[in-house]
Image (cartoon, helix red, strand yellow):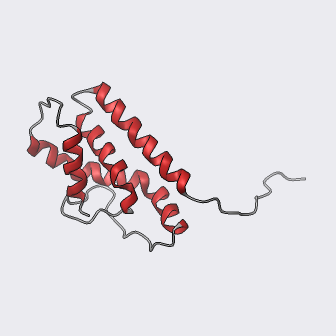
Amino acid sequence: MLLRNIYDTALKLLGEVECTASESELAERAPYIGAALCTEASALDRAYRRAFGMENAPEVNDLYIDLDSEFPLADRFAPAAAYYMAAMLILDEDVELYEKLFDRWCDALASISAEIPFVKGSIADVYPD
């Protein structure tokens, strides 16, 4: 799946909204937003991959990811990523819609987090006797 697929889904989420930004402006901003969302979700993606025996994600630029690049997170993150991308694209135009989409991003990440099984580990003793 390409980052462009995430961008196209985000545009569909915004399809009913009148946006003053041209599509070329949105496409210009999308690679930066894609890099930001991958950076924000990278720790959860690592935990998800580890829990389900997937190989590590490739290293990505944390400032810019070309729209025609492979989406670096696990496929499970694609719907959540579309919410984040749509939220960031509409932020300057419609704060209420931004908040709704960003809440969906947060809920989607919480759902992904809840799917990761518990891992038993020891507790560090940080209090001296």
Q: Position of residue 40 (x, y in %)?
A: 41, 51
Q: Is residue 128 left or right of residue 78?
A: right
Write the residue at 9% across / 38% down.
Answer: 22
Q: Residue at x 82, y 51 (%)?
A: 127
Identity of the residue drawn at 24% across and 58% down: 3
Q: Is residue 57 above or below residue 128?
A: below
Q: Is residue 4 left or right of residue 24?
A: right
Quadrant for the N terminus in the image:
bottom left
Residue 39: x, y in percent?
A: 39, 54
Name which quarter of the figure residue 59 lies in. Answer: bottom left
The image quarter in which residue 13 lies: top left
Q: Position of residue 64 (x, y in %)?
A: 26, 56
Judged from this view, the residue extending furthest toward the right is 129
Query: Which is more toward the observer, 31 or 98?
Result: 98
Q: Nearer the viewer, residue 126 or 53?
A: 53
Which image quarter: residue 75?
Answer: bottom left
Task: Give the tally of numbered discs.
Answer: 0
Q: Residue at x 64, y 59 (%)?
A: 118
Establish if 1 lies above or below 102. below
Q: Is residue 70 left or right of residue 20?
A: right
Using the image as rendered, state which of residue 112 and residue 95 is in the foreground: 112
Percent x, y of residue 50: 53, 68
